Amino acid sequence: MEDKFEHVVYSKNVIEFVTVANEFCLLLENSAKVEKLEFVETAQKILPLLYLKASMLPKNEVELDEEVEKFVTESDWEFIHSSVKTRMGAHNEFLEVFEDDMEYSDTPLVSSISENFADIYQDLKDFITSYKIGTHEVMNDSLWDLNNHFYQYWGQKLVNTLRSIHRLVADKESLRDDDNISASNVDNIDMSGSIFSQRQREWGEENE
């Protein structure tokens, strides 16, 4: 019988991607705890690496008949979105140039770092969670989903946002001006049904 660790989900490129994706998710989950300049400069370093590692993921085929479970809830998405939006403040929005509707629009299209990051986070966190707690069949199908979503959806969001992040890093003084904004509105989000609360409860039970 083939050793399960020879499966594609345990390949070097997948493991390296999981490592980088986890760092990106941790950055967003803790965005309220870091200054804006640190947040933006860290994102500047992680985003290109995340794109590179995603482009190197091996192609595979699905093994299960049913769809894999999704873990990120609406409240999780809203927490990440609100946290990043609060951290970015006046620097959250940027003009978009890679939208399908742009050629039909008479006005500039505006995108936001917080929304793009929350969308990317959703795909990455679902995959990471499946990778950590699933069987290799679940991990395999989660990898297939991730690969498809990268080319169809979040890969473009990543490079669009990197363009804005690069411009902000090039003008650091404007970031320092409002680095002390409050993150109080994040505390008002109900996270009782979120993946964070669920994992905390599970870890607490394991340690009792």
Image (spheres, rainbow, N blue to C red):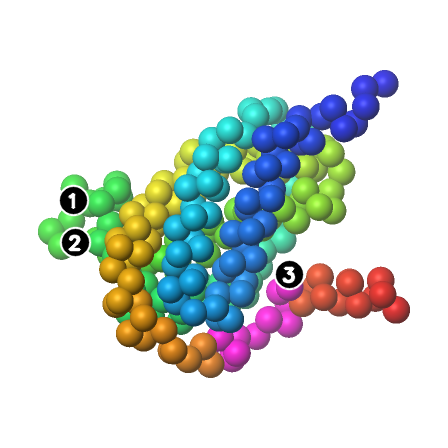
Residue 84 seen:
yes
Residue 208 picture location, percent across and down: 88, 69
Residue at position x 28%, y 69% from top? 90
Of the 4 image quadrants, the one containing the N terminus is top right
Residue nearer the viewer, 143 or 53:
53
Judge by depth and name the residue closer to the eye, 183 or 134.
183
Label 1 vs label 2: CA separation?
A: 10 Å
Numbered label attached to residue 104: 1
- Residue where numbered disc 3 is placed: 195
Amino acid tagged 1: Tyr
Q: CA distance from mark 2 to mark 3?
A: 36 Å
Q: Amino acid at mark 3?
A: Ile
Q: Please give the residue where the numbered disc 2 appears in the rendered image.
A: 108
Q: Position of residue 81 (x, y in %)?
A: 44, 63
Between 148 and 180, which is closer to the camera in this rendering? Answer: 180
Name, please, the residue furthest toward the right. 208
Q: In this picture, which residue range is highlighted in magenta? A: 185-196
Residue in the picture at 60% in, 44% down:
19
Judge the density around disc 3: few (<14), some (14-19), many (≥20) Cα neighbours within 10 Å. some
- Determine whether 45 is above or below 93 in the image: above
